[in-house]
Image (tube, helix red, strand yellow):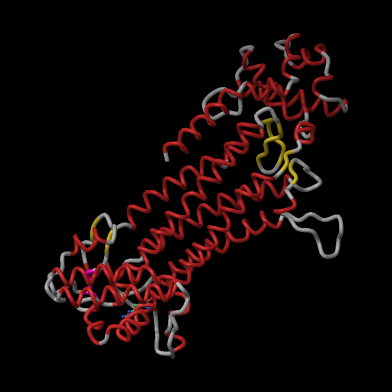
Amino acid sequence: MEKFNASISYDKAMWKQDIQGSIAYAKSLQKANLLTDEESQKITDGLEVVKSEWASQSFVIQPGDEDIHTANERRLKEIVGDVGGKVHTGRSRNDQVAVDMKLWLLEHIVQLAPHVTKLLEVLVERADREKSILMPGYTHLQRAQPIRWSHWLLSHVWPIVTDLKRLRSLYSRINVCPLGSGALAGNPFNIDRENLAQELGFDGVTKNSLHAVSDRDFVVEYMFWASLVSSHLSRMAEDLILFSTSEFGFVKLSDAYATGSSLMPQKKNPDSLELIRGKAGTMTGNLCGFLMVLKGLPSTYNKDLQEDKVKMFETACTIMGILQVAAGTVATLKVNEDVCRNALSEEMLATDVAYYLVKKGMAFRSAHGKAGEVVKLSEELGCALSQLTLDQLTKISPLFEDDVSSVWNYEHSVEQYKATGGTALTSVNTQIAEAQEFLQSF
Ligand code: ARG
């Protein structure tokens, strides 16, 4: 049971936050006259010693240390004597663990955000550099319409921009201090919770002690965030895995982000991207797993909640890796401009044939049908669309004229999409400028 109950093996990751919380709490007790100045100083000094032991990796975990809170308090009492027991006055591990986790997560988010930004910079920078490259765009994995490679890159920027905004708003929701809620009923010693929260860098205090010790929404939200970001990156990874096959050949991963096969000498496997795709599954599993823990719990603290940390730490560590490897993989891959362009085929201009007829005054539905006839004819004759004669085309519709030759041009095709968000150069440039502006202002 002791082994089953203990969380020290993983919650020791919060040693710093646990001590930070205790030092601030001791100050509050001092202000509320529950500790003399001397006692408070002794406790603070003792906690600093405990902190330095953790920092220098000389802290020795003892068999009875159930979790980080009991371990730190046990050690504090060894250093300062019985007075160490006063730091827990009116406090419970229930409010203590909640504050530790929030402090830990806030610090983690501060470290994580630059990695999200870095990935965005890599994508935007590439998009800016490689605007002239055209490639097929797909729906249902079927060749659909020509697009710019930069437009594809930027399609992965915008979801992550929103993820970054979500992370910021999530930060402000986490940033509310639960310490001073006690086990469940509140704090009976009239400590100044607002001041305590300020001391710890929080924006405010939780409003209800029962809720404060039950609440793990911040863990759920964070894991949802990680799950969403990683599924965005999984989509990008899946595209790139396909693009890197010999069948597509659009991109080539750098050796640093690929591996060889132990058996087949010619292989270059996109492990980086496959792991991003795979770990996105793990991220969602963590979210769902912890939601299952929460569902059906009664109010306030129940030991089930201890399951939160394993998931939160794993998520934090994994998402950090996903972001860094995604940035590295995208930054170092080579895009094969010629292969991308050669993959364009004239049937991808069928929509443009319809638009040509629309511009000549035909209703889109009819134009769609006529363009279909054009494609069918070219298939029957076994020739490309551009090889059809004006004679053959005018038999399908008299609206076809000499200028139809302008349709057989991929640049012309992409340049039609000038409305905001399209694949025309001006629209792509606008996206790049807006993304850069966002990155500068964030
Ligand atoms: N190790 C516990 C956790 O992680 C700390 C809180 C324990 N509280 C309690 N009443 N047993 O959730």
Q: Is residue 68 left or right of residue 10?
A: left
Q: Quadrant of ligand 1?
A: bottom left
Residue located at (28% from left, 83% from top): 80
- Tell me where residue 360 appears, x and y as whole percent: 64, 12
Q: Is residue 112 left or right of residue 168?
A: right
- Tell me where residue 37 appears, x and y as whole percent: 16, 73
Q: Is residue 414 left or right of residue 46?
A: right
Figure quadrant of the C terminus: top left
Residue extending furthest toward the top: 402
- Tell me where residue 392 appears, x and y as whole percent: 82, 15
Residue 127 belongs to the span the image colors magenta? no
Figure quadrant of the N terminus: bottom left
Residue 300 visible in image: no
Residue toward you, 401 or 208: 208
Quarter residue 99 falls in? bottom left
Identify the magenta region: 180-184
- Tell me where residue 377 appears, x and y as whole percent: 81, 24
Residue located at (76% from left, 37% from top): 336
Residue located at (75% from left, 58% from top): 259
Residue toward you, 284 or 429: 429
Quarter residue 122 falls in? top right
The number of numbered badges drawn on the structure is: 0
Would you say the magenta stretch is mainly helix, strand or loop?
loop
Q: Is residue 17 left or right of residue 118?
A: left
**Vertical side of 25 occupied by 419: above or below:** above
Residue 14 visible in image: yes
**Vertical side of 410 occupied by 232: above or below:** below
